[in-house]
Image (tube, helix red, strand yellow):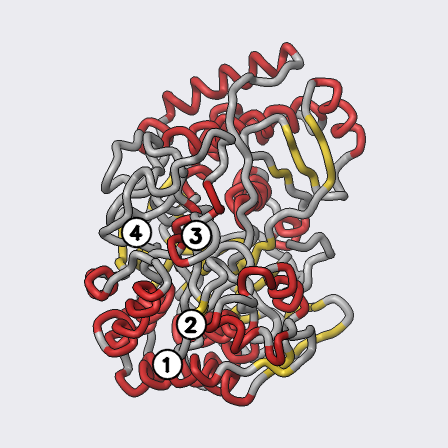
């Protein structure tokens, strides 16, 4: 998360897609960077050049994004990695004429039970085994998802997309400050894990920021996948056996059968039609986008965009968010295993019902009363890409909080995500763990179409702050019709349904004082970091903040 000014500024007024757009130069804070006229990949500055090169060489947005994303996962190993638990994407392909969504979430192993993480008398999971260690990790979905995007939509082989990552792992690169801080904080656990100790704690000390980081074991794993031009060895070959052996040795649950059963999928997007021209599309459950769409529907029912700027409008937005988070934390789970009222939550009738509650509480100057619990969910990377053919993609990937489960498969250099931590530990909850279930998480890659053609792709990184930050962007771009630059730079709000509300520092001070009097606990804090690409006035543009 960051709160600095946008790294790229430009003009945007989203319009219908053009078959032959041009690409506008991007102004970065403090420096100009020359770009080709082929499109953009945005999401992690240290690796964006990989995507730009592929686009310049004639690759499409998907070729560029897969290679860039994998390299980003290598360079920011505390955020995600090849063993990351999930990747999701909203995709406009065939020149933007067709939309689909990628679901590559982790699945719980067949031996997972609903009560495995049952809290103790103090309400906490004993030993936090749902967060750290081999029980916290299920079947990794990230590499399967990246392979599916490359295979289904790219013009280059998957093996080509792996080459930049292999080179980084072989040659080494300066270890990121965030990664160095994360392994230092996790030393009590990771320093005692043989696979992690070998990679992140040379000579028994945490790898320092700026030190050269290499992972030849992981490079060898990726070379095996490159030779096969497939992820088959990872899920159904020798690598799968070695992963399963690591679980068995360390008390985990994932087996070769669990790995062999895993498949990344292309699924129908979840849409919300805003008006006759504009539709917002996101990845369906178990992604976080449903919550974003529910908040947006409530704002539409409130006619929020026409409310005067000031305390009442801010109050109304917060309560729309709080109601959606209440529903998220009490009703949502894997729809293949539990009944989730998705249609009701996005219906006009329910949006009007929520709007009436919000109008009443705003008029009375009070706070809606309901009990939910906020949690600390961090991590993730998010990339967006567009090419001159009109293809768009917003993609988010993660292994959860810092270094995920904080365990590494010894001999493979594969640090594993903690997707099982995203389950609710209470056995009766819709999002309780269970065999083959997918956990509810926060990623919310989103596409906006106008007149049936894509004009914006946006996603975010920052754990539970993602759905809310994407909403803030949509309130500006969709509800208020603001430019990409204005939408990206507008200050953001965060709440998880409690009365605690966070605001970026640029928020109006008068609103904050008024909200305190109403009954909110208010503080300033960072939001999720968003990356977006857009087409407007016949030009392609990109932004990140």
Marks 2 and 1 close (CB-CB < 8 Å) = yes
Q: How crowded is mark 3: few (under 14 residues within 10 Å), some or many (20 or more)?
A: many
| Separation of residues labelled 4 and 2 (CA atoms) | 18 Å
Q: Is mark 2 on a helix, strand or loop?
A: strand
Residue bearing the label numbered 3: 447
Residue bearing the label numbered 2: 414
Please report whichever mark, 3 or 4, sits nearer to the chain's N-terminal start: 4
Please report whichever mark, 4 or 2, sits nearer to the chain's N-terminal start: 4
Residue 387: assigned label:
none
| Separation of residues labelled 3 and 1 (CA atoms) | 33 Å
| Separation of residues labelled 3 and 2 (CA atoms) | 32 Å
Q: Residues within 10 Å of mark 1 (few under 14, many from 20)?
A: some
**Which quadrant is home to the C terminus?**
bottom right
Q: What element carries label 1?
A: helix
Residue bearing the label numbered 4: 108
Q: Give 303 or 62, whichever is nearer the viewer.
A: 62
| Separation of residues labelled 3 and 4 (CA atoms) | 29 Å
| Res. 490 image quadrant | top right
At 69% from the left and 68% from the top, the residue drawn is 27
Please report whichever mark, 3 or 1, sits nearer to the chain's N-terminal start: 1
| Res. 408 image quadrant | bottom left
């Amino acid at each position: 998360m960051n709160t600095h000014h946008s790294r790229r500024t430009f003009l945007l007024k989203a319009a219908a897609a053009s078959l032959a757009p041009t690409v506008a130069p991007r102004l970065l804070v403090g420096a100009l960077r020359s770009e080709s006229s082929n499109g953009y990949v945005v999401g992690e500055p240290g690796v964006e050049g990989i995507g730009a090169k592929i686009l310049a060489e004639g690759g499409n947005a998907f070729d560029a994004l897969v290679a860039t994303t994998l390299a980003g996962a290598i360079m920011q190993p505390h955020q995600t990695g090849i063993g990351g638990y999930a990747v999701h994407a909203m995709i406009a392909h065939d020149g933007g004429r067709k939309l689909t969504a990628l679901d590559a979430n982790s699945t719980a192993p067949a031996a997972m039970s609903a009560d495995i993480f049952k809290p103790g008398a103090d309400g906490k999971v004993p030993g936090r085994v749902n967060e750290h260690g081999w029980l916290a990790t299920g079947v990794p979905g990230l590499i399967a998802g990246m392979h599916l995007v490359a295979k289904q939509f790219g013009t280059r082989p998957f093996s080509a997309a792996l080459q930049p990552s292999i080179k980084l792992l072989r040659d080494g690169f300066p270890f990121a400050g965030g990664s160095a801080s994360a392994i230092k904080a996790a030393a009590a656990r990771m320093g005692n894990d043989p696979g992690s100790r070998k990679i992140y704690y040379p000579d028994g000390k945490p790898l320092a920021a700026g030190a050269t980081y290499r992972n030849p074991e992981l490079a060898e794993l990726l070379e095996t996948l490159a030779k096969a031009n497939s992820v088959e060895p990872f899920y159904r070959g020798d690598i799968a056996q070695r992963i399963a052996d690591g679980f068995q040795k360390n008390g985990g649950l994932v087996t070769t059968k669990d790995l062999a059963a895993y498949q990344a999928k292309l699924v129908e997007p979840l849409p919300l039609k805003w008006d006759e021209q504009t539709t917002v599309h996101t990845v369906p459950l178990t992604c976080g986008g449903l919550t974003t769409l529910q908040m947006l529907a409530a704002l539409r029912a409130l006619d929020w965009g026409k409310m005067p700027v000031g305390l009442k409008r801010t109050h109304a937005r917060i309560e729309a968010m709080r109601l959606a988070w209440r529903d998220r934390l009490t009703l949502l789970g894997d729809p293949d295993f539990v009944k989730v009222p998705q249609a009701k939550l996005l219906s006009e009738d329910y949006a009007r019902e929520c709007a009436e509650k919000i109008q009443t509480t705003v008029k009375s100057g009070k706070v809606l009363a309901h009990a939910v619990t906020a949690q600390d969910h961090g991590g993730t990377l998010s990339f967006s890409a567009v090419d001159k053919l009109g293809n768009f993609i917003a993609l988010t990937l993660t292994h959860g909080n810092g270094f995920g489960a904080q365990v590494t498969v010894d001999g493979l250099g594969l640090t594993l995500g903690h997707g099982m931590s995203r389950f609710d530990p209470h056995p009766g909850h819709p999002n309780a763990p269970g065999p083959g279930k997918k956990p509810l998480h926060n990623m919310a890659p989103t596409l906006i179409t106008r007149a049936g053609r894509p004009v914006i792709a946006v996603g975010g990184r920052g754990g539970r702050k993602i759905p809310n930050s994407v909403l803030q962007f949509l309130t500006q771009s969709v509800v208020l019709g603001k430019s990409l630059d204005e939408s990206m730079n507008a200050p953001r709000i965060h709440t998880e349904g409690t009365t605690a509300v966070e605001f970026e520092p640029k928020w109006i001070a008068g609103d904050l004082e008024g909200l305190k009097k109403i009954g909110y606990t208010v503080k300033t804090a960072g939001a999720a970091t968003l990356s977006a690409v857009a087409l407007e006035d016949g030009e392609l543009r990109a932004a990140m903040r």
